[in-house]
Amino acid sequence: MRFEPGERFDYQGHLIFNRILHVDLFDSELEGIINRLPEFDADKESARSGFEEYPFSAQVNDHPGLPGEIRDICSNTTLLKYRYEDLVEEEALVEGERTTVDVPKLRDADVFLHPPNRIYIRASKREAKNVHKALSQVLNDHISEIEFDEDFLMWIFYNYASDKFGGESFEELFGDHNLKVELLTDVSITGERDTFGSVNRVEDSVDISRNIPILTGILRGNRISMIGGGFDYLGEKINLEINKSGRIHFKAGKGGLSVRNPLARMATSVALIHTFTEVYDRWKNLPDSSKYPPVSFFEQLYNDLQQQGVTVDEVNLDTISKVHGGRGGGGD
């Protein structure tokens, strides 16, 4: 199967990128890498899984209404469709009797190669694992997964509450990236079991910065493993969820993506992931004074809980600050 130049872009499933990869990939090597990947061919029994190049960047460039920043990012992006046949059980009438048979179904995943060193995989967990394996057979040791440091997720949480706690805001540090935290509504923390359990997940909260189970968990040394909500990207609200595993889930039914067609949704998502990973790279190079919350942040969390009638026993704020990457010692 080959893609026709005018074929309309579409995708199966949800806008979930289950893996982000770092790879030593350069423009001069891109074509050679693509040529070495197994090619999908539905007419060959031995090629029922493989890759096909799709004219994604050309279609994005021709799409009306997309901001120039998104078109610029996607113009450097190569989309490979990973296609494979999957057997699905279905009921069928066989020789007059109703029975269950295995029917081959064509599935696909989207693999975005963005030089010089990024690959974004939109696929289910199983598909993403298979794609990663296929890429590794070509790229060998030059490929690795990107996971988000829990301290980075805490930094997003802290900066979301910067008006309350006096920190530098996300957009003040990285305003040139056209990305702002607008409203955080979802968060998961993991760690020691307490009154609320070892894993706490809150969704659609009005204000996660005042959520009792979350604040209690943080003050007990639990770590943020997922954070999500509304982000302003190029003036448009995009709802997404970021997991420490590197998984990014775009909520296409909410915000600006809900009124976009599939091509515009995907282009916006790819551009935002690219922007977000750049922010992550820059965060890793920040000085500690900007990279981690000060002790005063955790003091304010403790005071907020007390105002809500909750006391967290045996809390050493200096120790908790260090657990979350902070500087300790009471400094700001």
Image: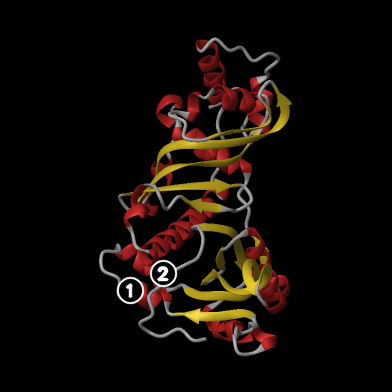
Above or below: residue 74 compared with residue 58: above
In front of the other: 299 or 201: 201
| Helix, strand or loop under label 2 | helix
Per the image, label 1 sits on a secondary structure element best described as helix
Q: Mark 2: which amino acid?
A: Cys
Query: Would you name the residue on which mark 1 appears?
Result: 61
Instruction: Tell me if residue 119 comes above or below residue 197 in the rendering.
Output: below
Give percent across and percent down for residue 166: 43, 27
Examine the image and state in which quarter residue 212 appears. Answer: top right
Q: Seen from this angle, which residue lies furthest front?
A: 96
Whether residue 17 appears in this view of the structure is yes
In this view, the residue in front, 115 or 125, is 125
Q: Are marks 1 and 2 in contact (CB under 8 Å)?
A: yes
Q: Residue furthest bottom?
A: 43
Residue type for callout 1 = Asn
Is residue 289 in view? no
Q: Residue at x 42, y 75 (%)?
A: 56
> Which mark is first along the chain, 2 or 1?
1
Disc on res. 74: 2
Depth check: give the residue in front, 184 or 143: 184
Between the C-alphas of marks 1 and 2, the distance is 8 Å
Q: Is residue 41 above or below residue 153?
A: below
Counting from the top left corner in percent of width and height, residue 260 is at: 33, 59
